[in-house]
Image (cartoon, helix red, strand yellow):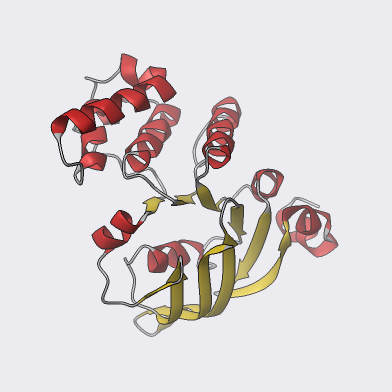
Amino acid sequence: MSILDINDLSASYGNISALRGVNLTVEEGEIVAIIGANGAGKTTLLNCISGLMRFTGTIKYQGELFTGKIRSDQIVRKGIVQIPEGRQIFSELSVLNNLKMGCYSRPSREQAQKEIAGIFRLFPRLGERKYQKGGSLSGGEQQMLAVGRALLSKPKLLLMDEPSMGLAPVVVEDIFKIIRRLNQEGITIMLIEQNAKLALKNANRAYVIETGEIQFSGSAQELAADEKIKAVYLGG
């Protein structure tokens, strides 16, 4: 059963076309990777889904048609949550207060505290640093904080933009263990990742965007074995 259906999606920055006629589907329970070069339109695609960008075409989430009139905060409440490129945590706020930002829709302080405690169990390092400023954390810890904040918004579909960016290989491995765990716990994930080999290793299916258009799609295993994909995106 599909959780997200996108048909003939186009978006522009002024006179510059960023996406042209994009069609894709995300099935419930999948990890779907979006790969492509810098500037191909990957982040624009996520921003359209999140309500941060005007578009033409159709986006359906759980059968509901989204239009440009639906606000991004309403989209979050429906279960689509984006972790942006570069984490974008609040560097001057403490870890705890960063997490509280993900709880703005909770009916009570007690419920928010209970759920934040759950994040500290998932990421013990955040619990150890809960009174530190977010900006003082390492890159890996900031990514954990961004994931924790997103989880507090109760996502059904989690949009992740370059989760491995700027992280050491051993930290990247930890982050992708977390991604697989979240998926196993029932969260559908749409993943942009510059490291195409890593993305295809962890995804069920993938789409390749080139200059705003989908050029290839299929199972991650099929794309990883495709000679053109290997030559252009996987280092030969």
Measuring from the top left, give residue 196's x and y in whole percent. 66, 51
Q: Is residue 123 visible?
A: no
Location of residue 135 (image quadrant) = top left
Measuring from the top left, give residue 87's x and y in whole percent. 37, 42
Which residue appears farthest toward the top when viewing the image?
128
**Residue at (35%, 22%) from the top-left corner?**
120
Nearest the viewer among 210 and 105 is 105
**Residue at (34%, 82%) from the top-left corner?**
14
Q: Quadrant of the N terminus?
A: bottom right
Nearest the viewer among 148 and 13 is 148
| As drawn, 1 above or below 60 | above
Q: Is residue 73 visible?
A: yes
Nearest the viewer among 40 and 51 is 51
Residue 44 located left or right of residue 188: left
What is the count of numbered marks? 0
| As drawn, 44 above or below 152 | below
Measuring from the top left, give residue 222's x and y in whole percent. 80, 58
Location of residue 115 (image quadrant) = top left
Residue 31 located left or right of residue 151: right
| As drawn, 230 above or below 173 | below
Measuring from the top left, give residue 133's x and y in whole percent. 23, 26
Residue 215 located left or right of residue 223: left
**Residue at (45%, 61%) from the top-left corner?**
43
**Residue at (49%, 43%) from the top-left corner?**
163
Residue 30 located left or right of residue 55: right
